[in-house]
Amino acid sequence: MRLMIKQRVFAWTDTYDIYDEYGNPKYFVKTEFFNIGHHMHIYDMYDQEVGVIHQEIFHLLPVFEVEIGGRTIGRIQRRFSLFTPRYDIEYHGWQVQKNLPTVAETMEKAAAMVVGHPVHMTGCGRTDAGVHARVYVANFRTSSTIPVERLPYALNTHLPCDIVVTKAFEVHENFNAIGSCARKEYTYQIYNSRLKDPFYVNRAWFYPRHLDENVMQAAASQFVGTHDFAAVRSVGTDVKSTVRTVYYYNVERQGELVTLRVCANGFLYNMARAMAGTVVYAAEGKIRPEEIGEILASGNRTAAGPTVPAGGLYMTRLWYDDGIEKFEVGSDGTR
């Protein structure tokens, strides 16, 4: 369905009406006063709030996150153009969602065209909107006789330029890309400079104040071990347990790029981004590194740092060991 937005001319606040392609009103949007960046509430025609759009700060061109039910489902990025404003809407994570472009849906359509029958793919995790994956593992069943080593070339001819299949191999009948995964590594990038770099837009979080990587490392080390990580997950998510094991959390600086690399046996929703925000909190002097253990023990989300923007986060390494399959997949090409 195509939607069109029209601003109300006579209104005390920034108010927008959203119509479908036949001119029927579907939603309306109200903007908050006295807020840093735009913060807009979306309502249906029964005056029920259905979502929120808020502007991310510290971007060269406007970037907006779209939330429904407290969960980020997409990002809208304005692109530079001389005349007509242009906006890009990114993939809404891995998992298939109704009426939203996702990586899984794109992959399944491409695979179906190649193997000649419908395909259901199981991915190694739910990467959220705006998050990147330098590595990703997905499995599917097929009766196709195409040699497995030829599948990447065939699939890539049907995929957009921002999704690439690098390797394919056969696994045992009960292999599951998420259930068989023993460990995951995420990397978060911060561009720590007084001046923005347009080549890092949506690829690293721009942070203009100097960050002391030694303080950040002291804070990151507090997360290592087995803990209850409820204090660094988004509220409202339903999981059986919030206990996870972090194997390492390393902070490195190369010039103006600060890299946070964390490995765990699993991650809660927004856990990696909230951990990064807490590490930055420590560098800002808002908390002491040694207080992080107490914050984790409290389970209090408001005591930890903020959830940092999605664009700086990458899935970078995966370890598999289910008793039959044992391998490692890294962004350096290891398998």
Image: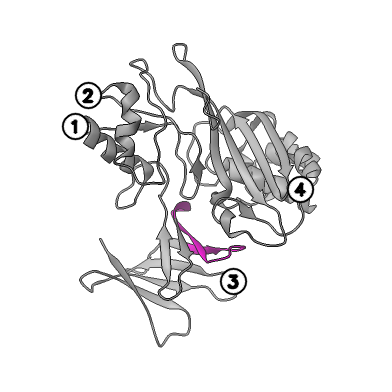
Q: Residues within 10 Å of mark 1 (few under 14, many from 20)?
A: few
Cβ atoms under marks 1 and 2 closer than 8 Å: yes
Q: Is residue 65 magenta?
A: yes
Residue drawn at point x = 23 percent, y = 69 percent: 21
**Figure check: 144 above or below 44:** above
Residue flagged by tag 3: what amino acid is it?
A: Asn
Q: Which range of residues does the magenta coloring cover?
A: 53-74
Q: Percent position (x, y) of residue 151?
A: 31, 28
Quadrant of residue 202 in the image? bottom right
Q: Percent position (x, y) of residue 239?
A: 49, 35
Cβ atoms under marks 1 and 4 closer than 8 Å: no
Magenta span: chief secondary structure: strand
**Figure check: 274 above or below 242:** below
The residue carrying mark 2 is 144
Q: Residue 35 has which mark?
A: 3
Camera sees residue 92:
yes
Among the two numbered marks 3 and 1 on one chain, the one whose residue lies closer to the N terminus: 3
Q: Percent position (x, y) of residue 6?
A: 35, 77
Residue extending furthest toward the bottom: 10
Element marked by disc 4: helix
Residue drawn at point x = 60 percent, y = 39 percent: 187
**Residue closer to the observer: 261 or 165:** 165
Among the two numbered marks 4 and 2 on one chain, the one whose residue lies closer to the N terminus: 2
- Of tags 4 and 2, the one toward the viewer is 2
Instruction: Please state, as top left, top right, bottom left or bottom right, where the N terminus lies in the image.
Output: bottom left
- Of tags 2 and 3, the one toward the viewer is 2
Camera sees residue 320:
no
**Figure check: 257 above or below 149:** below
How many angstroms separate mark 1 from mark 2 (CA)?
A: 7 Å
The residue carrying mark 1 is 116
Element marked by disc 1: loop
Residue flagged by tag 1: what amino acid is it?
A: Gly
